[in-house]
Structure formats: C-alpha cells, structure tokens
C-alpha cells in the first residue's frame, strides 16, 4: 500500500493539472533516458516528479495506465484538412506521422515502447487506441478518393494507408535511410503511390 | 583493466566459436529481457555468458563493437533470386524484411536499438552497415527494372525502396496495423506500387 501524504481529495476539488503534467513528464524523462518499461516503477516516477507514490496512485491505478496516458500526450490532434484534393489532404496528414516533433525525446521513446505494448493484448489495445484516431483520418480521405474517382475503385484502403504511413514512420523514428528527408517524404510518397512504379501508361 | 583468466592466445589457435556465440547470445538475451543499451554492461554480459570479462575484451574492444556484431547475427544473408521478373524478385526480397524470424526475441530488441544506434554518428554508421547489404539487393532489382522497362524510367529508386520496405518493417516489428498479415504484405505492397493508387488508366 502506498503511503498517503496528501489530504484526501474533497468532492469537487479540481484535479491539479500541474501535478499530472509533472508525473507524465517524469515518466517520459525516465523512458527517454533509457529506463526500460520493465524497470520503470511508480517509485522512480514519483521520485523524479517530486511527489509521493500515493499522489500517483490517486490518479492512475498503476504503471500501465500511466504509461498509456503519457504516450497519449505525445500525439497531436492533427492538421486541419482543406478537403479539396485527396492528394493534398494525404500529404497534410502524412506530415504528422510519427511522434509529434515538439518533444525531441520521442524518437527515442516510442520505438522501444511499441514492441513492449504489443506483448500483451491489453497493452496492444491501448497502443492501438492511441494511433487509431489518426489512422481514421487517413482512411476517410482514401475512402473519399475511392468514392469520387480520384483513386482507383478497387483500392485496398487498409493496405494503402499502411504503405503511405510506414515509410515515413521508419524514416522519422528510425532514420532508416541515410539520405531521405522525412519532411519531404509525404509529398514524395503520395506522388509515387498515385503514379505507381510500373511503366508509364501511354 | 579486466582480469585475465585464460591463457594468452597462442598463434594460430582457432578462435572459440562456441564462446563467441555464448557471449552474443547473452547480449541478445539481456536486451530481449528489457535491459536498455545504456544499462547493458560487459560485466552483465560476462556473467550471463558464464565467462570472465577478459574473455570478452579479448574478442571485442568494448560494448559497442560487441553490440554491432550481435546485431549483425540477426540478419540472414537473404534469399536467392530467380532474376526473371522484377515483381517476383522484389517479393522475395521483401519477404526477408525485418529481423530474421528465427529468433523470437528480435522484434523486442531491434526497435529499441535502432534509435539508440542513431544517437551517435559512429553507431548510426554501424547500424547502416548492417542493413546496407540488404538495401543494395533491393536497389539492384529496382535498377534492373528501370533499365529493362519493367519499371518507369523516371523512378526514384531510393524513395521506392523505402516505400516498399517501410510498411513491412512497421508491420513486422511494431505490428502497426491490427489486421494486416506481414507475411502476405510483400506481394500486396509490390502489386500496389506497380499499379499505383491513382484511377485505372483506360
């Protein structure tokens, strides 16, 4: 049982966002410094955040729930879409692939966490919950293109979405190719997919 | 200075492959269990492998060199290619994308290691050294297709290679999409790229 070092929460008392943020930031800090998810503990997070363990346990039932919320903060809501050309909307959405670039720690954190998340069904679902809203936006644009003829009628939307996002994700997170520029890739990938790699039709 | 607990290596004495393998296996085991690269030490590897630190230092100058060789063992040499159709050769090569599936620990190890490797120029080069030979095989097939007309003449080979490999890598390593089958993706991705996602040409 964690020691209680704060007064019990009174009804209607507003949650301290500042404390929430300090706890989430401490979690991300520890991960970014190389602490593995297995080694990460509520105790080490509390110590880093300068709060007691009870403060964390009042907000989250445990490490996994906290981790889920910490990861969720890494995702921005995504861009506004013009809604005119499928090509332009896809490029806008692909510009947001990968961890939000505002936090330089993310490229170090996410690739380690995702395989961890996929080890259990529950974690995998949590990880899917985080990325699903963004996938949905890409899906909607692709479906719109299929419906209005900008894209081929028999397009496999799930596959195409993965083929659009995957290369940018590996480039942004893993810097997989030494020479490609992840920021230029959204337009490059969309245009390659639009045209295909087959010989030009005459 | 590590203590020496073996007799000095006599000229011509064959290197003990068994010991090499035990050390590399211990390194991969520790990583797969969640030990971060930062925390990983020659001491912990020696302990796990059942050898003295000096045994490791006689074979590798330090942790980074050992890590490089351990990672290199995760890559298989790749498939034989029929050399007839570009499509078939690409599918064969893409079937080997990602860590060799013979070692179930890999999906947990690689995604954590790659960002670590990319933090320093030296590590990034080592990581590129490991994947470059495989990229070269894909490059050669794409260039052959451009040369013989199976692919479009103005194809961006580096981009296309990344668009072919990236989706399969994120699916195999991160299980990014809950419903796609990484084993079926090589043919699916190649055929999507061949046809493009644009409307069918009449």
Image (cartoon, coloured by chain):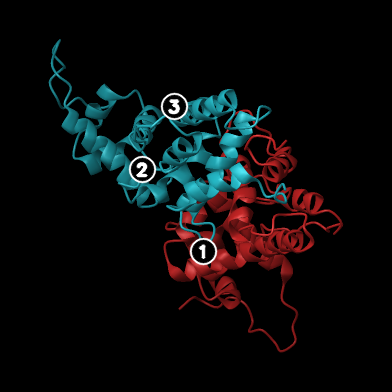
Chain colours: A cyan, B red
User: Element under label 1?
Assistant: loop
Instruction: Evaluate whether label 1 is on the same chain as label 3.
Output: yes
Observer-nearest residue: B100 or A84? A84
Residue at (70% x, 50% y) in the render: A200
Q: CA distance from mark 2 to mark 3?
A: 15 Å
Residue A165, given in percent of the width and then of the height, sits at 53, 41
Q: Residues within 10 Å of mark 1 (few under 14, many from 20)?
A: few
**Residue B179: numbered disc:** none
Say which residue label 1 marks. A178
User: Element under label 2?
Assistant: loop
Marker count (numbered): 3
Residue A178, given in percent of the width and then of the height, sits at 51, 63
Residue at (15% x, 17% y) in the render: A8
Task: Chain letter for mark 2, please.
Answer: A
Q: Residues within 10 Å of mark 2 (few under 14, many from 20)?
A: some
Quadrant position of the C terminus of chain B in the picture: top right
Task: Chain letter for mark 3, please.
Answer: A
Q: Earlier in the sequence, mark 2 or mark 3?
A: 2
Residue B101, given in percent of the width and then of the height, sits at 70, 47
Q: Earlier in the sequence, mark 2 or mark 1?
A: 2
Q: CA distance from mark 2 to mark 1?
A: 21 Å
């Amino acid at each position: 049982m964690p020691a209680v070092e704060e007064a019990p929460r009174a009804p209607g008392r507003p949650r301290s966002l500042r404390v929430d943020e300090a706890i989430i930031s401490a979690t991300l800090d520890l991960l970014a410094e190389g602490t593995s998810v297995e080694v990460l503990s509520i105790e080490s997070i509390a110590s880093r955040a300068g709060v007691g363990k009870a403060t964390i346990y009042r907000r989250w039932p445990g490490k996994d729930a906290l981790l889920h919320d910490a990861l969720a903060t890494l995702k921005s809501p995504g861009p506004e879409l013009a809604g005119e050309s499928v090509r332009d909307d896809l490029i806008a959405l692909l510009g947001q692939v990968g961890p939000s670039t505002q936090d330089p720690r993310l490229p170090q954190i996410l690739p380690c966490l995702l395989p961890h998340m996929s080890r259990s069904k529950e974690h995998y679902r949590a990880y899917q919950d985080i990325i699903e809203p963004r996938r949905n936006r890409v899906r909607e644009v692709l479906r719109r293109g299929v419906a209005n003829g900008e894209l081929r009628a028999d397009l496999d939307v799930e596959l195409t979405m993965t083929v659009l996002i995957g290369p940018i994700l590996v480039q942004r997170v893993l810097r997989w190719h030494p020479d490609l520029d992840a920021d230029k890739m959204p337009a490059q990938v969309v245009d390659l997919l639009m045209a295909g790699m087959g010989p030009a039709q005459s």
